[in-house]
Image (cartoon, rainbow, N blue to C red):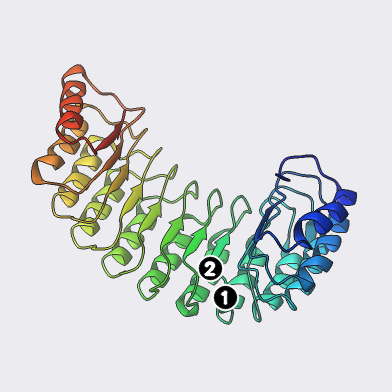
Amino acid sequence: PVSNRDLIDADMYRVVRYVIASRKYNEVDLSGNKITQLGAQILAEAIRKNKTLTHLYLVNNRVGDIGVSHLADALEKNTTLTSLKLGGNEIEQKGGEYLANVLRKNSSNQLEDPGAIELGNALKINNTLASLSLVNNGVEAAGAQALAEGLKEHLTLFELDLWNNKIGDDGAMHLATALKSNRTLRYLYLGKNQIGDNGVEYLAEALKENTALTHLYLRKNKITVIGAKHLGDALQQNEMLAQLYLFGNQIGDEGVQHLAMGLKKNQHLVALDVGCNKLNDKGIGSLISIFENDSVLSTLDIQFNQIGEKNQAKLIRLIQFHPNLKIYW
């Protein structure tokens, strides 16, 4: 393992010689080290010639815009890398521009809002990127809009991770518009993005039309009973979503009742996370009632809520009756 090892730029010569140049590995994780633009330049020279590496992770280093420029130049020659993660690397607009130029010919990356705009433009042309992670990068609504425009035309991306950004309701609206026509995205991570009920309404409407998305993560946003109702309505129509994560919102008992109502008509969702949502016995009871209708739900997370003794007993009996059911409380 070469992640979280306090590696510095000089160590990259050894990484190149024994790991990348050996061509034995298709994935190299150098996250959590002390790599700067100099180390990035050393890695870039190796990537330029490598034909086996498909995943390179450099999260939480100090690469910066100049380091990104070296990697971008290398990617113009490399045609095998499908996932490049650079979250937490002090990359700003200039770094985004470098990568966007390359993406018009090749692969992947992560940036702040101006860079995300460039990246979205590149997605319209790129034909190889499968997974894009932009976690912890300050992407706002404008960046989300650009990414959404790219998604409308991009045919290979199956995973988009925007955890801990600032896209808000407007950003969710733009992504929802893309979801109505996109047929390849399977995983969408929008946790901790300041999304409220209005943003969720847009996403819920998109779910009524989308036939591809299987995992939707909305943890730690600002969703209340209103947003939960929109999602519950969408669940009655959606036939693809398999996992929905709502941990750390404020949907309450009434909100979870709307979700339960939707699930009684849904035969596709297998995992639901409503932990830490201010639920009490009334809401927990509505979730338990789902299983009276032969629900396909196999994983239910209700941790950090208020569950009385009677409902705890019901949950225990439920697990005994459904041995494959996993309930966390």
Helix, strand, or loop for circle 2?
A: loop
Picture quarter containing residue 241? bottom left
The image shows residue 320, relative to residue 118, as above or below, that is above
Q: Is residue 56 left or right of residue 268?
A: right
Q: How far across and down, in percent of the image, does residue 133 sit?
A: 58, 58
The answer to which image quadrant residue 85 occupies is: bottom right
**Residue at (45%, 67%) from the top-left corner?**
174
**Which residue of the protein is positioned furthest toward the left in this rendering?**
292
Q: Residue furthest top?
A: 309
Which residue position holds label 1? 128
Q: Nearer the viewer, residue 20 or 181?
A: 20
Amino acid marked by disc 1: Thr
- Where is residue 56 drawn, in percent x and y? 68, 59
Q: Is residue 300 left or right of residue 5?
A: left
Instruction: Provide the residue designation for mark 2.
Output: 130
Q: In 3D space, how far apart are the residues under numbered discs 1 and 2 (Cα atoms)?
A: 6 Å
Q: Amino acid at mark 2?
A: Ala
Q: Residue at x 16, y 35 (%)?
A: 288
Tell me whether the residue at label 1 lies in contact with that at label 2, contact meaning CB atoms closer than 8 angstroms: yes
Categorize mark 1 by other alpha carbons within 10 Å: few (<14), some (14-19), many (20+): many
x and y, in percent, of residue 294 in the image: 11, 46
Q: Give the structural element (helix, strand or loop) at label 1.
A: loop
